[in-house]
């Protein structure tokens, strides 16, 4: 039975487009990509295609329980050589077959998905080449490939590709670490040698709605989290509260306090909130002029999740050549306009390993002005063992790592080459249409409150209530939002939390593999600026194989 209505239905032209992309790039088809016909790839893929729930996989795998026991007990390196003509170590094959199965259509737990076939090939090439991007001497032509990917992303976002720079690194957390570090080194230059507590007083700003790496990175850098970081309030849609940002920024500048970095987020993990960039940049310019501040904040954007929306910056929304449905087109217009402001950032994070359909890890920090890298440079004497004739001015002097794998570059370059703008548009639109249909079905279901529905991204969070006790989920959520400090309020929230958690555990892994998160929503702020987190459930529709029928099956048993 289909519950689609016109604004949410998949149009025929788009159905053909996504079918073509699935067939060409997500089938692990040995006719197109011969390595998938070879062992052990073929047997691993055959097992994973059974789409078994996690709890059943060990028992169904040949000798699975015995292999599992061996794997858990293995604690010594084999003493002898192994015959290279023999098959690969069965424990390695077992681990690959039973690793997280992102290919199953039900996998929608988080901002991760199955990589596309060409990107897998690209990563294999990169692993075989074994380039270390820390220095051209150790990477040679792989450096040119990295530079080409950086130029493509710079052009797509609206930067001058001849003036910008980029560094592939090991995950979005490291990209955000670079963002913080760029601001610190530019605005607190003595910190490189004397530490953060030497010299000027400072505050680093991020959002209460940002990724947890916004805080863990500051701790890693030695920032006093309680006294030297400011977390800006968030709106009901979980994006940064501009009024609170202005209050905090103005207070800093009035006291002569440096603000090295402001960390924004474009596409939060759980609710896909998108912070505005241009208003933040304009506010910084206005207040810096007013208070005669010369150390302007470095604006870094964590766009690890949402960055592929840059492929819609030139999309013809009036003609709508991909035949994207009406509901998705409305949200896509709004979000694309926000991503049009990404060009005003000083740096931003790109995770190809998320919505870019590239294997882990493939992350890129983009830097608008390549001259900013000079702030990260260390003393050349530290690099005396490299060949001077080939050293020159390279990333070597500015990178955090002493080893930078090129596999992420090869995967990203291959995905960009094969999918192009059109392929990325199709995959993004498919994600958003599927998420839109999910929100539509949630709205039809008793006892369900969809959280931050206006964000219209691939991430959808909801809160579940007992229909026998709660007739109006919106009214119930409004009561929770009031954050009353009364026993009745706490008992009510606890009752609702316990119901949702119990149903989630009993439902288990079924038609959709969702995730339970402690901070799916938040209450209103009290007079001291404090708030409470409200848990909920989330599904992230980046999986290109998830269908509307999977959603219908999940909705049918959402209350267990």
Image (cartoon, helix red, strand yellow):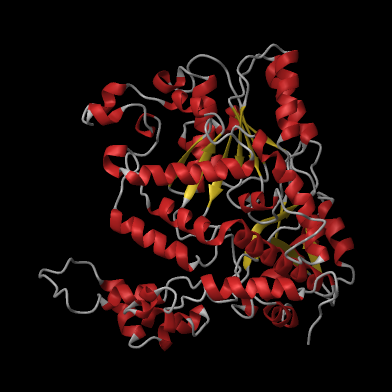
Specify the farthest residue to the top: 292
Residue 522 in picture, x, y percent from top left: 74, 51
Which image quadrant: the N terminus?
A: bottom right
Horizontal side of 338 relative to 126 (left or right) equals right
Viewer-closest of 205 and 17: 17
Can residue 521 be seen here? The reply is yes
Which image quadrant: the C terminus?
A: bottom right
Horizontal side of 476 relative to 55 (left or right) equals right
Residue 515 in picture, x, y percent from top left: 62, 66
- Please tell me which residue is depicted at 74% across the width and 43% down the height of the picture: 234
Question: Is 341 above or below relative to 261?
Answer: below
- Please tell me which residue is depicted at 55% across the width and 47% down the height of the picture: 350
User: Which quadrant would residue 226 be assigned to in this image?
Assistant: top right
Viewer-closest of 175 and 485: 175
User: Which quadrant would residue 125 be assigned to in this image?
Assistant: bottom left
Question: Is 134 above or below relative to 409?
Answer: above
- Please tell me which residue is depicted at 87% across the width and 62% down the height of the picture: 474
Residue 275 in picture, x, y percent from top left: 71, 42
Question: Is 7 above or below relative to 487?
Answer: below
């Amino acid at each position: 039975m289909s519950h689609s209505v016109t604004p949410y239905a998949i149009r025929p032209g788009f159905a053909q487009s996504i079918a073509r992309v699935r067939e060409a790039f997500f089938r692990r088809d040995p006719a197109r990509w011969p390595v998938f016909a070879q062992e052990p790839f073929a047997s691993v893929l055959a097992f994973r295609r059974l789409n078994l729930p996690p709890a059943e996989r060990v028992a169904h795998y040949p000798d699975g329980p015995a292999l599992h026991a061996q794997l858990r007990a293995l604690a010594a390196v084999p003493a002898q050589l192994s015959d290279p003509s023999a098959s690969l170590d069965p424990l390695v094959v077992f681990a690959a077959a039973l690793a997280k199965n992102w290919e199953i259509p039900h996998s929608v737990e988080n901002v991760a998905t199955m990589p596309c076939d060409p990107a897998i090939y690209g990563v294999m090439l990169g692993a075989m080449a074994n380039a270390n991007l820390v220095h051209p001497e150790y990477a040679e032509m792989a450096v040119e490939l990295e530079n080409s990917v950086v130029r493509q992303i710079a052009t797509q976002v609206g930067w001058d590709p001849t003036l910008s720079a980029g560094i592939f690194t090991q995950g979005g957390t490291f990209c955000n670490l670079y963002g913080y570090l760029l601001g610190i080194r530019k605005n607190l230059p003595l910190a490189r040698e004397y530490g953060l507590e030497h010299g000027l007083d400072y505050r680093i700003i991020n959002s209460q709605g940002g990724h947890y790496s916004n805080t863990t990175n500051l701790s890693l850098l030695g920032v006093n989290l309680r006294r030297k970081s400011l977390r800006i309030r968030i709106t009901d849609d979980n994006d940064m509260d501009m009024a609170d940002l202005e209050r905090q920024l103005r207070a800093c500048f009035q006291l002569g306090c440096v603000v090295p970095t402001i960390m924004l987020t474009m596409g939060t993990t759980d609710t896909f909130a998108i912070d505005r960039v241009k208003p933040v940049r304009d506010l910084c310019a206005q207040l810096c002029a007013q208070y005669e501040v010369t150390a302007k904040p470095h604006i870094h954007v964590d766009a690890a999740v949402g960055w592929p929306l840059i492929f819609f910056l030139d999309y013809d929304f009036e003609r709508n050549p991909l035949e994207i449905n009406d509901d998705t087109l409305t949200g896509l217009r709004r979000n694309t306009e926000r991503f049009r402001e990404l060009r005003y950032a000083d740096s931003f994070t790109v995770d190809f390993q998320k919505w870019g359909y590239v294997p882990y890890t493939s992350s890129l920090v983009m830097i608008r002005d390549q001259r900013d890298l000079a702030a990260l440079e260390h003393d050349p004497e530290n690099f005396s063992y490299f060949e001077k004739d080939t050293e020159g001015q390279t990333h070597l002097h500015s990178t955090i790592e002493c080893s930078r794998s090129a596999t992420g570059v090869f995967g990203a370059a291959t995905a960009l080459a094969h999918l192009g703008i059109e392929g990325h548009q199709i995959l993004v639109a498919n994600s958003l249409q599927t998420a839109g249909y999910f929100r539509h079905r949630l709205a039809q279901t008793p006892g369900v409150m969809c959280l931050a529905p206006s964000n219209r991204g691939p991430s959808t969070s909801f809160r579940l209530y007992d229909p026998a006790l709660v007739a109006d989920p919106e009214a119930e959520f409004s009561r929770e939002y009031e954050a009353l400090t009364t026993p009745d309020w706490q008992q009510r929230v606890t009752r609702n939390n316990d119901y949702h958690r119990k149903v989630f555990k009993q439902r288990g892994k079924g038609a959709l593999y969702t995730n339970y998160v402690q901070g799916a929503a938040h209450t209103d702020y009290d007079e001291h600026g404090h708030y409470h987190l409200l848990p909920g459930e989330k599904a992230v529709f980046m999986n290109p194989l998830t269908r509307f029928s999977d959603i219908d099956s999940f909705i049918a048993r959402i209350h267990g």
